[in-house]
Amino acid sequence: NAGVMQNPRHLVRRRGQEARLRCSPMKGHSHVYWYRQLPEEGLKFMVYLQKENIIDESGMPKERFSAEFPKEGPSILRIQQVVRGDSAAYFCASSEGQDDYEQYFGPGTRLTVT
Amino acid sequence: GENVEQHPSTLSVQEGDSAVIKCTYSDSASNYFPWYKQELGKRPQLIIDIRSNVGEKKDQRIAVTLNKTAKHFSLHITETQPEDSAVYFCAAGGSYIPTFGRGTSLIVHP
């Protein structure tokens, strides 16, 4: 059973470009969460999705950021017109259900904006 | 919303000593308290969790205690080893979104 997969692992973008981060949850998991981690800081919740639905996006900036989890394929976190402040590690986690189910984290995508 | 405070931010111990990391939370509705270990450049991994109907849980050298009245919970690592060096995150949740502490960098000196 493969764990949570994320790609790319490292992504370099110039200011103004778009960044697309992908996350494939563990087999059997239909709940996906995206977190952002700045250097030497904790994990900040961004968005929670189930298949084809955004359940909670309260942690996601209103502009430039969007997320989806289509019926087929991975979940995608999209950042338009990236700025230097977007440089961070973005982790995806998946769980079997909501409430107090264990979240399994992917290896993360380290985004660097130059 | 939930607010989780974690202390200390850095903890340095000698190999073989015990290490204790403490967290407090604000939302009395929280009933699930996981702890994650994150080694440098790697993903957070769950090491132990506790639910509100339990006061203490142990797994080999790791234990977690929960005081719901005082709204705090702690991670205890005994007989620390250099490979325990990592950043440890506590989290508290009652809904699907746990709130994470800022992390404790544990350094175990050989």
Image (spheres, helix red, strand yellow):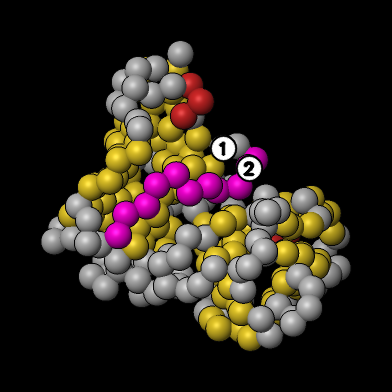
The answer to whether residue B18 of the structure is visible from this angle is: yes
- Specify whether residue B62 is painted magenta: no
Name the residue at the left extreme.
B69
Query: Is B43 on the left or on the right of B109, as rendered?
Result: right
Are the two marked residues, 1 and 2, in contact with CB atoms closer than 8 angstroms? yes
Picture coordinates of residue A59, whole percent (x, y): 54, 74
Q: Main secondary structure of the magenta part?
A: strand
Question: Which of the 4 image quadrants contains residue A33?
Answer: bottom right
The quadrant the N terminus of chain A occupies is: bottom right
The answer to whether residue B21 of the structure is visible from this angle is: no
Q: Chain of mark 1?
A: B
The quadrant the C terminus of chain A occupies is: bottom right
Pick whichever, B59 or B88, lies toward us. B59
Question: Residue at left 44%, top 22%?
Answer: B81
- Specify whether residue B43 is painted magenta: yes
- Residue assigned mark 2: B42
Question: Residue at left 67%, top 64%?
Answer: A27
Is A80 above or below relative to B69? Answer: below
- Residue assigned mark 1: B39
Magenta-colored span = B41-51
How far is disc 1 from disc 2 in space, using C-alphas?
Answer: 5 Å
Question: Which of the 4 image quadrants contains residue B60?
Answer: top left
Q: Residues within 10 Å of mark 1 (few under 14, many from 20)?
A: some
Picture coordinates of residue B10, whole percent (x, y): 40, 35
Query: Is A37 on the left or on the right of B74, as rendered?
Result: right
Kind of residue sitting beneath label 2: Lys
Query: Is B103 on the left or on the right of A80, as rendered?
Result: left
**SS assignment at label 1:** loop
Q: Chain of mark 2?
A: B
Q: Are marks 1 and 2 on the same chain?
A: yes
Kind of residue sitting beneath label 1: Glu
Q: Residues within 10 Å of mark 2 (few under 14, many from 20)?
A: few
